Structure formats: structure tokens, C-alpha cells
Image (spheres, grey):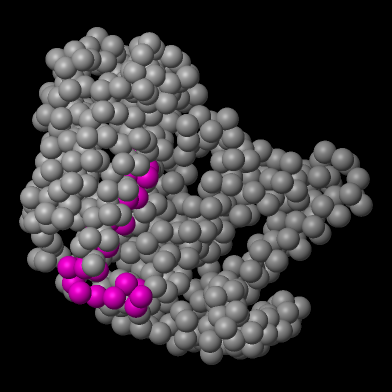
Amino acid sequence: MNKMLKLMKNLITSIEENPTSIMKWTVAFTSIIALRIFIEGWIGNFRNKSSLFIFYEFTHTFLFFIISFLLFLFLISKILKVSLSKISNVILWGFLIILTPPIIDNIISRGNGFWSFYKFDGILGLVKRFFTFFGDKPEIGITYGVRLEVAMVTLLLFVYAFIKIKSEKNKNIIALKYSALVAFSSYLLFFILGTFPSYITILVEGFKKGFLSVSEVDIAQMFMSPFSIFSREIMEITSVFNFKMSLVYVILFSFIVLVGLFLYQKERLVSFLKNIRLPQIIYHAGLISSGLGLGIMANSSSGDKYFNFFNILGFIILIESVILAWLASVVANDLTDKKIDEKTNNSRPLIQNKFTENEYKIIGIFLFLFSLFFSAIVNPKFMLLLIAYQAIAWIYSSWPLRLKRFAFISTFVSAVASLMIFFGGFMLLSPNQDLTKFPKSIAILLVVAYTLSLPIKDFKDIEGDEKDGVNTIPVIFGEYWGKIIVGSGIFVSFLLSVVLLNEFRLFWWAIVFGGISFWMVNKMSAKGGSAFGGKKDSRSLINYRNIFWWILGVISIYGIILLEIILL
């Protein structure tokens, strides 16, 4: 017995110590998911499936298993006090078992196959199923193959925990207690994952029907009935189910990742979050929201019909995708702007050595890929716009083009990138997800206004930009005339809104808010001069680093007035 335990311990140690990296892990994990989908297709004789089904089958499967991986990773690491890297290696090897359920079901059904997905039930039914190993009807939902998989994994984790604790404590009783805790927690986690749509339906429908009244039928109706995500219709039952679960899992995955990073990489996470440029986050969220609002107006549709659980999830995911795309562009910019940041932004993560350049590049790659992945789930055309956004951000920041070096060209390029996000919001509510009804005057206004206004961000980097050969307006014309030029550009943008929107009731409002903006720009200072004139004071209200907030506030108030006038 001791010899067997020793052999198993050596095997576990060799697996735990496997050399790996985040990129290698990603390739291995994705390969296992791809093989699982291939096996299911092979068993089904590769019957014709729509591209929609194939795509959402992948997104649903990938998200389900990566969430499962992360939850088991954190759970086992917490109970056994083993490093994440070691547990990750063990679970990744164990994940090969997910290839077996389709094969087992095919053998038991003699080639007819079972429908494997989830168990649907109300609260009382779920309690009963928990104590009866998922209950009856293993031909559908949690099938024979899945149940065998759950049993095998629970047993293997029991053995793993026993060997780990036994080798450290050398006491069978303690090892058995920890092993039983790991096994029970694993089964509980398996059960929650295998019945997850039930909890979502109970939470959403429970307030209307009563939490104990939600039944299997309600869950099937919520997740398997045809659905429109904004103006895009999805009619196939299986595709609808995969789509809706993908939406739920994107939110859950994002939450788990953030919590995990906070628990295990808090210092780095905080450092990165301090560098996200919060005004830009609000600005980008405002772009997609404004585009969505214009889409409602241009297509004469009621926003109320889009106000449901899955559309709300879709909107949140698109905002997240845009934020991830922005953060990917921040990473690319920071990698190229190290010389500038050493001079004027020395609190940034790269300058503070919170990440190596290679780690920072990997973060940028994952931010970019997840921005595309998440947006494609909601609307593939939105993903294409984010690709264009990222391409523009790249040629703006990086060599060999690095267009940010040239005044007005740089802000024109940024304006076009912003327009991509605005277009995306508009297209969500267009009948054919296109720009046919997009008002050309709005496009012109946005490009001109952004081109003239965005140089406001360059004042805080004057010294670094000048050193690195980046010819912004304040570098070329100096601070005094730079403020006058940029302030005048913002003032002109307000006036243009009157002309291009053909709404002359806005004229005096444009004069007032444009004038306030001009005054703010010309009163700001590097250290923060007095907002009301006078000598420089570090306690100033308006400075180069917070001016974006002030202008954003003025534009927001003006936008509210604009909407009230137009809708009257």
C-alpha cells in the first residue's frame, strides 16, 4: 500500500512540476476543448450543422469548461494550500477526462446518442436531485457519460487530496477529512454547474412567479425559446440555448477572473487598474450608449422592447468588449511610450516595473482576443468594428507609422477610432445591422469635433512628447497658444453641432457651453493653477490631468439639453 502511495505521489509531483506558461496552457486547454467538440461531431457523423450552431457550441463549451477550470483551481488551492501553478497542471491533465462522456454515451446508447447538457428543475426538485446524484432520466441532460465523469473526477480529487495531505501531515484521519471536504466540495460544484440555468431562471422569474413556483418548463422557455438580441434574430433552439448560456458565462467568467486576480495578484491588479484612464472608459461607454440611442431614434423603434434580461447582458458584454479593446490599446501605447512616460507618467505599471515587457505584451494580447471573442458572441459585425478600432489604435501608437507624432493627423485617426465604437452601438438596432440609416451629418460632426477636441489630452505629456519627437499642438505652438488653439477647436465643435444637426434652438446653449469649455482649457495648468486666475496652486480645481473630466461634464450637460430640445 505504501509503495502504491509513493508511486502515485511521484506521479503527482512530476505533473505538478511540469514546465508551462500562460500561452502554452492556453493552447493546451483550447486544444482539449476543440477535441471535445470534434468527438461530438464525429459521433454524430458530422451531420450538417449551421455555422451559427458551430460557433455558439464552441463559445458555450469553451466558457463552461474554463469557468469550471477556474472554480476548481481556486477551490482546491484554497482547501489544500497548494500553489496555483501546481494545481493548474494537475487539473489540466485531469481535463482530458472531458473527452470521455460523448464516447461513453455513444456506447451505452448503441450509437443512438443521448442529449447531454443540463438538468432543469425548480428549487425542491434540485434538492432531491442533489441527494440522488442528479436524479432520474440519464438519457437526457446529465447523461450516463457525464455522471460517470463526475464520479471519476470526484474520486480522483479525493485520492489527490489524500496523498497531498498524507505526505505533509502523515496522519490518515486528517488526510481523510481533507479528502472528504475536497470530494464533497467538488460534487457540489459539479452539481451547481450541471444545473446552472435553473438558478438563473429562479432568480429572474422568481420575483414574478414565486421562487418555489419556477418549474422545468419555465427554465426551458427562458433558455430555449427563439430570441432577438437587439435586432438580430436567433431561431434555432440549440443555437439559442448555447447563445444565452454564452452570455451568462461571459459575465460569470469576467467576475471570476477579477476576483481571482484580486485575491492572488492584488498589487499588480491595482497597479493596472490605476492606469486604465477612467475618463476614457466613461467616454468609450458613452460612445456605444449614444450610438445605441441614435439607433433607436433613427429606426423609430421603442427602447422598451429591448429591455429584457439577455439584451441587458448583451449590452453589458459589449461595453466590456469596448473597454477591453481600449485597454489593449493602452498596453500597446505604454509599450511604445516608455521614454515619454519616464518623464511625465512615472506611475505607470511598466515604469514602476510591476510587469516585464513580455508580461505586458501577453496581457495586451489577451485583452485584445477577449474583446473580439466577447463582442462576436453578441454581434459578429461589432467584432469587425473592434478589429478596425484596434488596427487604428496600433498605427496611431506603434512603429513604423506611429501617427501620434503628427498634430491633427493623430487626433483625426483617434476620431475615426471613436466613430467605430459609435457605429457599433447604432448597428445593434438597425434591422440589417448596417449603417444605411446613419445620419451622415452626425458622422461629420463627430469626426470634426473629436479631431479638434482630443488634443486636450496632450498637455500633460508636453515634456515627454517633445523629448520623443511627438509633435502635438502644445509641443508645436507652446502651452499658451496651444491652449487657445485647442480651446477654440472645442468652441467651434459646439457651434458645428448647431449647423450640422440643423437645430438652431441650440445656438445660445452652444455659445454658453463652448465658452465655458474655452475658458476651462485656458485656465488649466500643469501643476494646477487657480481655476479663477491668479498664481499656480497645487490645490487647483483644473489642471492638465483632470481637464478631461471637466470637459466631459460640460459635454454631458449639453448632450442632455440637446436631447430634450430634439425630443420636444
Residue 176 shown left or right of residue 249 in the figure: right
User: Which residue sits at x=35%, y=42%?
Assistant: 553
Is 297 one of the magenta-colored residues?
yes
Q: Position of residue 299 (x, y in %)?
A: 18, 72
Is 79 one of the magenta-colored residues?
no
Among the 4 quarters of the image, the one containing residue 85: top right
Q: Nearer the viewer, residue 162 or 508?
A: 508
Q: Nearer the viewer, residue 297 or 378?
A: 297
Prevailing SS of the magenta stretch = helix
User: Which residue sits at x=32%, y=22%?
Assistant: 524
Residue 112 shown left or right of residue 135 in the figure: left
Residue 111 versus residue 349 in the image, above or below: below
Q: Nearer the viewer, residue 51 or 479?
A: 479
Q: Position of residue 216 (x, y in %)?
A: 57, 87
Q: Nearer the viewer, residue 404 or 250?
A: 404
Residue 264 versus residue 563 in the image, above or below: above
Among the 4 quarters of the image, the one containing residue 151: bottom right
Q: Position of residue 1 (x, y in %)?
A: 84, 51
Would residue 342 be seen by someone viewing this image from the given angle? no
Magenta-drawn segment? 280-306
